[in-house]
Amino acid sequence: MTINELKQRAESIANAHAAEYAQVSRTVYDFHELGNQEYKSTAYLRDELEKLGFAVQLPYAGMDTAIRAEYGAGHPKIAFISEYDALPGYGPNKNENGHACGHNFIAANTFGACAVLKEMYDEGLFKGTIVYLGAPAEETTGGKVDLVKFGALDDIDTAVQIHINGGHITHTGSATLAIDSVEFTFEGVASHSAGAPEKGVNALDAAYLTFNGINALRQHITEDARIHGIITEGGLAANIVPAHCVAQFYVRAKDRDYLTQLTEKVINCARGAELMTGAKMSYRYFENSFDNLAINPKLKELMEANLVLAGEKEENIDKSWQKPSGSSDLGNISAVCPTVYVSIAAHNDDGSSCHEEAFLPYCGVGELGTACLDRAIKAQVYTALDIYANPEILETL
């Protein structure tokens, strides 16, 4: 078959099973489990993948809700990167979880892509391996970082993910900031604030001075960098010199190498505060560090053409490289494996977007969400077929 004929066959399969893929999205949507608690979602996905004949590992990479499923043999080996954690804070009392970021949509579009390709593999239409690779807690601890540390991407040739976003513009050049999460603990000496202040060593002052040092540092950092923090423990009573204080900071920049230097400067601010106050400082990285997202230019070009083929209008595709915003653990995958990422338009008209309660009805459910799911599945399959049919493409990535 020619590549066009392969994609026509893929379209036919995707159309025939569209309702099944929509059901996957709806089911994970209804589970709406928070990060590292996605037990029902991953058990369901495991069962559905096993029905297709995939060899499934769950738990995986030392994480209860990480999943790896494979079908086929040899290379190219393409991984479809899944997510399935929800967000808290929705409903009338703001105490309900919900998939307002559409990770159920990602779980389903990666599943659908794998299912279509599996059927084509069984028909002898290409050679290689199909990998469904999912990690927990994208919104919080970042399970993909642990996948990379485990070596889950070591044998992967290409990684693919499509996220949903509000409005009518699909972005293929998204960028994220690398991030380090640093927690400082200061230990001082308690004393009566009025009766014997000279006996105290003020740990809270050390935290304040750390903030002040960082505020001065902000004049001398690149415009893409961000530093923001809070004091999580600052003392127990106003008439006691605080002997224990904890502050947490997020340090971000668009380039990992620069961020590493910047984080060291932030730590030096805390070291200076230690010297000035006498409060002993220690620090730790309280969450996984994320790398900046680096989309592969060649894969980006392939995906842009295939988005149009999948039904996205070309005038709705923004191919420009975006200004970095936020952070994602997908960046760590892109640091070790050629990666393509798309933020695909839901085509909703109410102005809502990810993380907003009003966006819940579009996240891979309902008429617009289901249509978007169909485009995302097809675009991923078509891009994978370009690689499976022409493995020499891998040498250009």
Image (cartoon, helix red, strand yellow):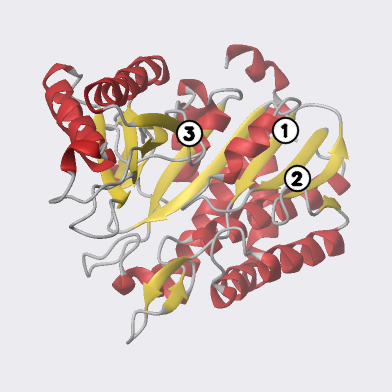
Q: What amino acid does circle 3 point to?
A: Arg
Label ID, residue 284: 3
Q: Are the residues tagged 2 and 3 within 8 Å (C-beta)?
A: no
Q: What amino acid does circle 2 point to?
A: Gly
Label ID, residue 62: 2
When asked about the image quadrant of residue 353, the answer is bottom left
Query: In the rendered view of the protein, which quadrant contains the C terminus?
Result: top right
Q: Nearer the viewer, residue 288 or 384?
A: 288
Q: Residue at x 24, y 28 (%)?
A: 277
Q: Position of residue 119 (x, y in %)?
A: 80, 52
Q: Nearer the viewer, residue 320 or 252?
A: 252
Give the distance between the C-alpha atoms of the residues marked 3 and 1, in whole angstroms. 21 Å
- Please identify, in this view, whether the residue under mark 2 or under mark 3 is nearer the observer: 3
In the figure, is residue 382 to the left or right of 392? left
Q: What amino acid does circle 1 point to?
A: Phe
- Graded by Cα atoms within 10 Å as few (under 14), some (14 to 19) or many (20 or more), the crowding at tag 3 reads few
Q: Residue at x 55, y 63 (%)?
A: 104
Label ID, residue 15: none
- Graded by Cα atoms within 10 Å as few (under 14), some (14 to 19) or many (20 or more), the crowding at tag 1 reads few
When asked about the image quadrant of residue 244, the answer is top left
Q: Are the residues tagged 1 and 2 within 8 Å (C-beta)?
A: yes
- The residue that mark 1 highlights is 150
Q: Position of residue 177 (x, y in %)?
A: 35, 32
Give the distance between the C-alpha atoms of the residues marked 2 and 3, in whole angstroms. 22 Å
